[in-house]
Structures are given as structure tokens and as C-alpha cells.
Image (cartoon, grey):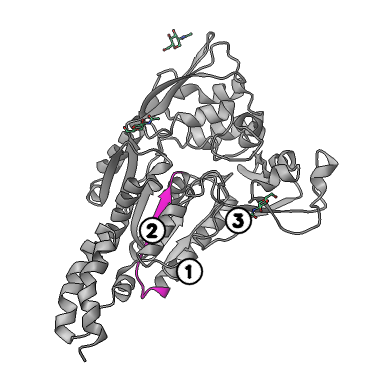
Amino acid sequence: MAGAPTQLLRLLPLLLLVLPSGLREYLSPEINHRPEEDGTAPDPGVAGDAVLHPIVLVPGVSCSKLEARLTGAYRPSVPRCGAMKGKGWFGLWDNCSDLPAHHYVHCFMEQMSLVYDPVADDYRNLPGVETRVPNFGSARGFQINPEHPDWCLQALRRELERIGYRDGDTLFGAPYDLRRAPPMPGQTSRAYSFYFRQLTRLIEDASRRNQGRKAILFGHSFGGTVALAFVQSTPMAWRDRYIKHLILAAAPPAAGVVPTVKYAASGPEVLYVPTAPPPSLRPMWRTFESAVVNFPSPAVFGRRPLVVTARRNYSAHDMAEFLAAAGFGAASVLAFRRREVTSMDRFQPPMVPTTCINGVSNETLEQLVYWDGDFNARPVLVYGDGDGFINLVSMLAFDEQMRQQNEQNKLFKSIRLEGARHSTIVTDDWALKRVMQEILEANRISG
Ligand SMILES: *[C@@H]1O[C@H](CO)[C@@H](O)[C@H](O)[C@H]1NC(C)=O
Ligand SMILES: *[C@@H]1O[C@H](CO)[C@@H](O)[C@H](O)[C@H]1NC(C)=O
Ligand SMILES: *[C@@H]1O[C@H](CO)[C@@H](O)[C@H](O)[C@H]1NC(C)=O
């Protein structure tokens, strides 16, 4: 009887040494007593499995693929863009190297574009363009940026797999339509109604597969905005039953962030398309609701000039005027006024255990100077504190809002990682380790 199990027992301390510290702390008490009691060797794998709550990853804005299908109703601006008409589903936002390789960048921008429908107060595709998000449910189907293969939660996924998480069993992914923003309560969004139903079902299934355990919902960057809005959209009894913990890593708070203003004016730096620098992606970006949903809010940014020109300054109160001056279409400005301005600072605590992890002490855009009022020119940038994307004042406002609600305050933890940046907070070893500790901590808290 003294064979393999005893040997394994001797090896265990060594095995534990190579595990990340959070898991080591977690496993040690279990492993210390079990072998003596029944004489069988503990199996760290099984021990790991036994304690893991399912986790659902919601990645950043560039990380969800999008497929399209062009029907007869599609009227391409140039014949070339109609090449895929009637040919079924294809990856529109998928392998971004493919776009220049097939001279498809212009067509891509056209087919990605949204149109605001003022009657329905919702966004839709161009006529004849149908879209869908592939790989829903998997944490292995996100879009990969060839220049940053660790982005889109790839490094985090590998860490999770290292401690025993398995895609489809305990680990899941919830990509979304990157062009759209989650609606505030009372707003219409057909796309998000569908997505929230999908995510509800995914979490219920994940729980069922895992002996009824609640799920941890993890959102990074814009994925945090989506994850938070999802929780807020669910009935309280459902949240209590299914959400173990909400973890928001570098999620833009409701108060908004200044860099979104720069992307709107000068083009997005978040979508990587080879050969297509940010300014060239601007016409497409400006049709997206995700481009303007995190604009800075008056309650937090007040009257301070965010955009400075010789003739006039624009504060958070003047963002609709700024969009018009920067060349946004009338429909997009109307959509901004109706959907974003009215919902800025409307904050509801998620009322589930929540941990926020944010980087600080990195230069973060606070003001843009387009002195000549030419928004095609390169702005002079003025920096303050934050994670390189999220302004510190927004993070502080979020914490304050969470703490104002007494019940939420008991379930809220805010962590600042000195020197972590918006994207590297889930890729740099030291920051990733800290994020993993919080995931393990969320697993450990009873309830
Ligand atoms: C992406 O597209 C490029 C260019 O068409 C091709 O060389 C590459 O193999 C593709 N990568 C993947 C992962 O499909
Ligand atoms: C705009 O803001 C700048 C910087 O705060 C200030 O110096 C300038 O006087 C303001 N200009 C106008 C027209 O209000
Ligand atoms: C980000 O913060 C770290 C630590 O404070 C610092 O070393 C790094 O230079 C900063 N980077 C920027 C761009 O501010």
C-alpha cells in the first residue's frame, strides 16, 4: 500500500511550490488534512477542480470577432465591396491581416458601419448587411492582434488553464458586438437584449455543469463596461443565485474617460488594421456607439476645458457641440444627445461582490489642444494621472459611488496597481499575478 501514493505525498510540497501563491494558499489547508485521514494521496488536480467556480471572460473592445453576410439588399459604394454578396457568412472583423491582403479595408469600414435609427432609437447595420458574433461561449475564440498576441485576455486564459480551468467546462468567453454599447435601463438595444439573454443562458449552463456553483464574471476594459451593465440588467434574485463575483479590470467607469474624445476626433487607437492608421478608420469608428459611450461626464469632469481651440473650449458639458464641430454626422450627434448625455452618471451599484483592479501613476490624457480648430491636425496632449486610458478622477468617482451604497460597500474591494497600464494590467507578469490572486480570492470567499 506504501507505493505511489506515499511518493506523491513526498512530492506534494514541491508541486505546491510551483503553483502560483494564491492557489498554494488556497490548497494547503485541504491538502494538509486529507491524506492523514483516509490514507489516500491527495490529487491537486481534483482538489483544484473541486474548488473552482466557473469563470466567464468578457474581453476588451477589439477582441470580439464579427461575421457578416451580404444579401441582395446591400448596395456597395464600389463594386469591389459587393464581392461577398450571396456567399454566406464570412469573417469581417477577424484576421485583420486579411483586410489589406484582399484590398478590403474600405469595404470593411463600410460593412462595419452602424446607422442610428431615430424612430427606433437604436442602431442597425447598413441595409443588406447582417452580422453575428462567432465563438460565443469560448474563451479561445477571441480576436488576436498579431502585434500583441497576449492581449485579449490570452495571457490570463493561459494562467487560468495552468491552475486547472478548462474551456467549455469551467472557463467561458462572452464576446460581444464591439460596435455597440450596452444600453442604460429603459433604453432599446436589440443587439444587447439578445446578448444578455445569451450570457444569462451561458452562466446558467456553466453553473449547472459545476454542481450549481455560481459564476465569476471577469471583464477587462470595455468588457468590464459590458459585464457591469449585464449584471445591472438582471433580476436581483438571479444575481444572488448565479453571480459569485464580478471582477472589473481597468473598466472605464460611468464617469467616462478623456482618451475617447481623442479617438473620436483623431481616430481610434484600439482597432489594429495593418496599413490603416487610426485617422483612416475614423469614418467607421464615428458610427459606433462604443466610440462615445464612455465620453467624460459633466458630474466628474465639470467645466474644465477638455478640448482647447483658439476660438472656443469644450468641457464635458459641450461634448455634443464638440462632436458636431469635429465632423460627426447629424444622426450620430442626435444619438449621442439622446442615448449618452441623458445616461451619463446614472449609476446603479451591481449589488454583487465586486472587485475593481486599476492601474495608476501612468500618464493619462486629460486635455487636447487643437489650437487652429483643425481636428485633422495632430493635437497637443496634456496629461494627468491614470492607467494610460482611464483618468484617476473617474476611478475615484466610481469607488465613491460604490461606497455610497451601504450594502454594496460591504461587497466592494478596489485595488490600485502602481504603474500598471490599461492593457498590460492583464499581461505583465506581476500585475497578472495580482489579478489571478483576486480570482482565487473570489473562488475562496464562501457563499
Ligand atoms: C491571416 O491572413 C493573412 C493574410 O491573408 C494570412 O497570411 C494568415 O495566414 C492569416 N492568419 C490566420 C490565423 O488565418
Ligand atoms: C480655453 O482654456 C484654456 C486652458 O484652460 C484657457 O487658457 C483659455 O483662456 C480658454 N479659452 C477660451 C476661449 O475660453
Ligand atoms: C507607467 O508607470 C510606471 C511606474 O510608475 C513607469 O515606470 C512608466 O514609465 C510609466 N509609463 C508612462 C508612459 O507613464
The reply to whether the residue tagged 3 has its Cβ within 8 angstroms of ligand 1 is no
- Whole-percent x, y for residue 317 in the image: 46, 23
Disc 1 is placed on an element classified as loop
Which span of residues is magenta-colored? 209-221
Nearer the observer: mark 1 or 3; the answer is: 1
Disc 2 is placed on an element classified as helix
- Whole-percent x, y for residue 251 in the image: 41, 43
Return the residue found at the far bottom: 1
Q: Residues within 10 Å of mark 1 (few under 14, many from 20)?
A: some
Quadrant, the N terminus:
bottom left
170 displayed left or right of 189: left
Q: Amino acid at mark 1?
A: Gly
Q: Which mark is residue 133?
A: 3
Distance between the Cα atoms at labels 2 and 3? 25 Å
- Whole-percent x, y for residue 29 in the image: 17, 69
Distance between the Cα atoms at labels 1 and 3? 17 Å
From the image, tell me which residue sits under label 2: 159
Quadrant, the C terminus:
bottom left
Ligand 2 rendered quadrant:
top left
- Whole-percent x, y for residue 45 in the image: 33, 73
The reply to whether the residue tagged 1 has its Cβ within 8 angstroms of ligand 1 is no
Q: Nearer the viewer, residue 247 or 421?
A: 421
- Residue 219 in magenta stretch: yes
Distance between the Cα atoms at labels 2 and 1? 16 Å
Q: Amino acid at mark 3?
A: Val
